[in-house]
Amino acid sequence: MPFEYLDHTADICLQGIGKTVEAAFAEAARATFNLMVDLQEVSAREVIHVLEEENDLDLLLVSWLATLLAKSSLSGMILSRFHVDISKVEGGFSLRGEGWGELLDPGRHRTKTEVKGVTYAGLRVFQADGVWIAQCVIDI
Amino acid sequence: MKKDFELEQISSSEWTLPRHGEMRVPGMIIADQGTIEQLQADLEGGAEWNALVQVRNVACLPGIVSASLALPDVHPGYGFPIGGVAAFDIAEGVVVVGGVGFDINCGVRLLATPLDREEISPFLTKLADDLYRIVPAGLGSEGKLRLSVQEIDHLLQEGARAVVERGYGLERDLTFIEEEGRIPGADPSAVSLLAKQRQFRQVGSLGSGNHYLEVQTVERVFDVEAAAIYGLSEGQVVVSIHTGSRALGHQIGQDYLKEMARASERYQIPIRERELVCAPIESPEGKRYLSAVAGGSNCAFANRQVLAHLTRSIFTDLFNLSADEVRTVYDIGHNNVKVEDHLVKGEERTLLVHRKGSTRAFGPGREESPVPYRPVGHPILVGGTMGTASYVMRGTAMGMEKTFGSGIHGAGRALSRKKAAKKYWGEDVKASMAADGITLRTRSMRGVAEEAPGAYKDVECVVQAAVDAGINLPVARLRPVIVLKG
């Protein structure tokens, strides 16, 4: 399942699309890292673990992406492959996720742009035409 | 919906969005006709992100004073419009994360050299290569400095001074940075360990996106008196550095978006868009955010200080200059929030002013300006596009009244990055710049396409609208010679 970018003048609005909400979250992460590098050039060698809990799926999407960005930036990694499990817990949702990738090597990876943050603008996790869409605006 | 956004034209470049519904103040938009038409077309086309809607949403926030403002480089942002200015009463008002954004105190440093275009012409390639080598740019770019958490804490509190102490620059530089490169009240404990850890390699790096370093020439002086005071003259070679607070600022923004979401609920603040999450200015959450923003702002000042020093070292080596011959003209941010005194309807008031994609533009006489600049006001640094021109402007007494002393910060985007990347090829943009005598060095051709000059509004129209409204005056136009992009 794919991801898409919608028009936004200053920044990027991305949509991760999947048969399940988990797949949509994984695609949203691919859409985020695809802004930085060519995903095909990234080998899935090392893993970053993410554990988040939020009141609703919208906030969970922001936490998932923001934590991936923070952790990958901290270790100088770029990520290309993701796996997500979401379960209902009391008062909201819990996410257990993984992001696979490798150390950024500017000599080998064709870099694109840096991602500054995940905003609450245009933030929506919803179902349409039988698929899940995880949407938010990324500040670049 | 459309009826709610009917604008009333006040002058050739000023429009109001009359108060209606939940708006506490009217909207006020300063822009040229073309920009207004674009904003209205966005509205009619049902664009999900619309600057007029954003101006309206900001006007609904508690404690907002006078008007929700948008300046001529206005375009849709998230929460606030880019080019948005909003001032709040300290007791009644709120501080809004979306009014600052993730790139806290992103701004521009302008350096002046004693050289003219002819003197650098034989060395353009070497100069471009040397700058490209020494200035870390691009995705995940890292500086040479490696700072421990304790050293980052010191930098959060001391700003540009913290790196001057380490040999990155001159004491004199500090005099010519907004707020002397140090915003008081930064509390390191308000900044997460994660934010500090993410920064430890990034002080002294340019980043990517619309950030740049440009070697420029002063193409034209419009205001002889102000230009003389700023030390600018036609033909002179100058350098502009556009970057911000890097990962530290980004992480502060991300951390506080979450904290403010909780605060908005706790204080039951009615907001029209989730991105406008906020807290009362005088609440513990509001104060904590402001002290974190002060730290993020100081980090941005320090970052530009290191880059200015690296740039200076290239010029002094290549052209046999002394360090003080490569002078800081000014350094000013355009994503910030500040406590300032303003006259509102004849009454002196202390306000919290958010500027998202707008600079401070204080007119003559204000004590916030460096002493030598007070007769004309401090410079406003307006980043144009990499193929056209940038401007040095200054503020006016009228701007103090109309916009809380605020100015334009750039040309403002016209096309989305997606549309720009579809319309332009990086290589074509580079070739067309080369034909205009501009040398480009970049790590990302895709980035060049997204930042193509054609993706921006015409900077001349943006400048003219600010001049027509009487808020900013042009001092000099700068033409790029070398452009470095991340």
Image (cartoon, grey):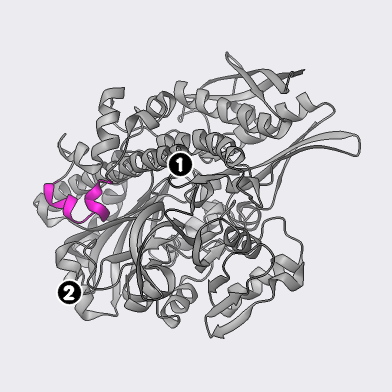
Q: Is residue B99 above or below residue B12?
A: above
Q: Chain of mark 1?
A: B
Image quadrant holding the C terminus of chain A, namely: top right
Percent coordinates x, y for residue B100 in the rendering: 47, 49
Towards the viewer: B356 or B67: B67
- Magenta: main secondary structure equals helix
| Residue at mark 1 | B283
Q: Which residues are magenta?
A: B170-183
Say what secondary structure mark 2 lies in: helix
Q: What x and y, as percent, mark residue A58?
A: 70, 35
- Pinpoint residue A33: horizontal percent, then vertical percent: 60, 32
Q: Disc 2 marks which residue?
A: B228
Residue A68 lies, with reference to residue B413, above or below; the image says: above
> As rendered, which of A128 and B54 lies closer to the eye?
B54
User: What type is the residue that disc 2 sits on?
Assistant: Ala
- Using the rendered image of the protein, determine whether residue B273 is visible from the camera's viewpoint: yes
Residue B181 colored in magenta in the image? yes
How far, Cα to Cα, is label 2 from label 1? 45 Å
Of the numbered discs in the image, which one, if any, rests on residue B398?
Answer: none
Q: Residue at x 26, y 80 (%)?
A: B223
Same-chain status of marks 2 and 1: yes
The residue at 69%/46% (across/down) is: A122
